[in-house]
Amino acid sequence: MKHKVTALCGFHAIEGALRAGQPLGEVLHDAGRRDQRLTRLLTQARQAEVTVRAASREVLDRISGGARHQGVVAVLARIPAGDNSELRQWIQEVVTMPMLLVLDALQDPRNLGACLRVAAAAAVDAVVLPRREGCGLTPAAIRVAAGGINHLAMFEVSNWARTLDEIRDRGIWLVGTDEDAVDELHDFDLDRPLALVLGSEASGLRPLTRKHCDALVRIPTAAAQRSLNVAVVAGVALFEARRQRSSACPPGS
């Protein structure tokens, strides 16, 4: 299950959404384009209290997912994501060696977006977020994700404890990151059905989430800098999991 409709591309789609009063998070336009049609559209967007930003062509291409956008893209105010029942169904149908990213109440949408971009690059199968805690899938998060969300199954769930239990019951290991953990990331066996669990920027994993983890690991750092940005942690941990899985596969398999 992959939710690809995160943005509207081109004048016709965006003008129609504005006329219909569809909630839009922001309108991004080609910084190098100057013409009357664009001016009218941006005026309409501002009148509807939609944020307007200039962006490079590269950014527009990534957010649009390669669709023709005419130099203007609108990010939806709220990105649709699967709920508990859809995640339950996805878990039942999932491949033998899934890799999930579970993000426990991240507060900064830019960090969330960066984690989604990293997850897509690491070929993560799904991302799970709590519905009522954290920043959620805001336009800012989608912009920073730079199209990464188009390649991920996304789930926002309301019963966090039950969700973690259901993931574990499927035989997927919940491995949390914690700077005080005993085991180091690179020494831990990640070549297994895996859900990497990351906590919020300020306080890390919540006690409830920590309680549900099968294991906790840490990324070894110099004494002068113990903590890392959550997106950096995601990148290091996810690509270490990919490295271990690749090393475990015989050549040509």
Image (tube, rainbow, N blue to C red):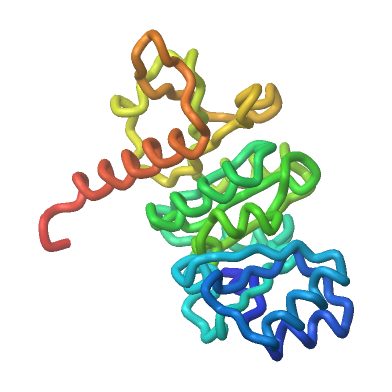
Picture residue at 44% right of the left edge, 36% below the top: 232
Identify whether 162 is placed above or below 206: below
The image position of residue 155, as x and y in percent, is: 66, 56
Q: Residue 170: image x %, image y %?
A: 55, 48
* Residue 210 is at least partly visible in this image: no
Q: How many marks?
A: 0
Is residue 134 at least partly visible in the picture? yes
Image quadrant for the N terminus? bottom right
Image side of residue 185 versus residue 54, left or right? left
Considering depth in this image, is 18 or 150 the residue closer to the camera? 18
* Image coords of residue 135 (percent x, y): 72, 44
Q: Is residue 32 left or right of residue 80?
A: left
Q: Quadrant of the C terminus?
A: bottom left
- In which quadrant of the rendered view does residue 46 lie? bottom right
Q: Residue at x 76, y 83 (%)?
A: 40
Depth order, front residue of 59/182? 59
Residue at the (60%, 45%) spot, across then down: 110
Q: Nearer the viewer, residue 85 or 60?
A: 60
Relative to 153, does residue 74 appear above or below in the rendering? Answer: below
